[in-house]
Amino acid sequence: MKLPIYFFLVLFFCFFDKAHARINYESVICDDCSYTEAKSIARRYKYQPELECFVDWGGTPDDQQCRSSTTKLVVYDLQQEQFYGFYIGYTNQGRPFHEMSVEIREMQQVPAQIKEMLINTGNGYKIMTNVTRDLRANFDLNALIKKQSRNSFSMFNQQRVENDILLMATDCSNSPESKAMELAHNLIAKGKIMTHANDKARRDEKYKNSFQGYRITGANFQVALGGFGVGGTVEYFDETKNVITDFTVSHSWHLGAAARNNVVFKLKMVEGSIDVSTDERLSHVGGIPLHLIKNSGASAGTLKASDISPCLADAIDKQFKKTVSSGSNPGSGAAPSWRNIPLNSRGGGNLQRDTCKHTYYDLNGEPLFSFEGPCP
């Protein structure tokens, strides 16, 4: 059985502080929108500027004076490369709030700097869309998964299901949980993906070195150029431009129970080059999001060994160093060590009554998370 691997597209350029720009604009990039749709976007509550109201000492509500700035909004149609500009403010400035109403005026001319920034921002999304589509079509993701024995995933088939189940009942080394946990933390795999992605981006005809002035994270972006600043969102109706899924469609199972084991790689563009990291919220091991596994023991709660599969427990033990302690204090000062009381064993105590704290550490010896599990 193949292990599902996903790519989640996120673009990220170097940090930009919109406050450094002298003239700031809001913007929305859409995927083939008309003037009517652009005007509808301008009517959204989020683009109405804040009102500042005050009443002089001793005044009445009718003496209230309200004022606001004006929001400058540009809607960019990515397909037609069409720009729609609007000024959004309030009528009757200086009057009481109940006498004011939202006013939307058309922008006669969108500044050239704003157009340039939005075109380059749109190109950035196109580049990363092309990169993720190329990874899906041409990159051998299965080559990143170690094939450790005859029982590797590439050899799963219906005729061997019963034998594989019996083998995994006593050996988790080739389980979906083990493969997913290892791949999620595999720097070599990420490096290979990163190299392929950057090679593809550099060959893209829309690639521009000017992207260093941009910050784009998922659907949000901020840009600065020549004293102008733009912050906004991208609204793609074609979701495959933001998320690429289903490199494999099968979910793993262990002892006959279905459980999701997928690794989601997040692509970012940092100062003009692509970086790759694991999205721990979208990745699952043994059916549990990876970020919840690595948050166990925090204020949100603690996972128990009895609540997870034996192969997930084994995968956690193999990936991280740990100490085992009774009570709430981890380790009692002991140095982290490998496989110190397996999380999936019963130990010397009764798991129903006697549980110890299994605390896991990073490579620097700093505590990461903890589980309740068997005692020595």
Image (cartoon, rainbow, N blue to C red):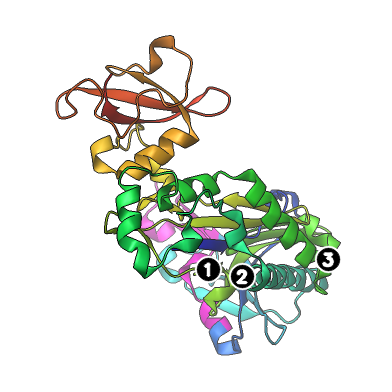
- The amino acid type found where label 1 is placed reads Phe
CB within 8 Å, label 3 to label 2:
no
Q: Which residue is mark 2?
A: 136
Observer-nearest of 333 and 29: 333
N-term mark: 1 or 2: 2
N-term mark: 3 or 2: 2
N-term mark: 3 or 1: 3
Q: Can you tell which of label 3 and label 2 is closer to the viewer?
A: 2
Q: Is residue 294 visible?
A: no
Alpha carbon distance from label 3 to label 2:
23 Å
Residue at x-position 28% and y-position 18%: 376
Residue bounds of the magenta highlight: 38-67
- The amino acid type found where label 2 is placed reads Arg
Q: Secondary structure at mark 1?
A: loop
Q: Secondary structure at mark 2?
A: helix
Q: Which residue is mark 3?
A: 208
Observer-nearest of 295 and 354: 354
Residue at x-position 42% and y-position 27%: 339
Q: Position of residue 312 (x, y in %)?
A: 37, 43
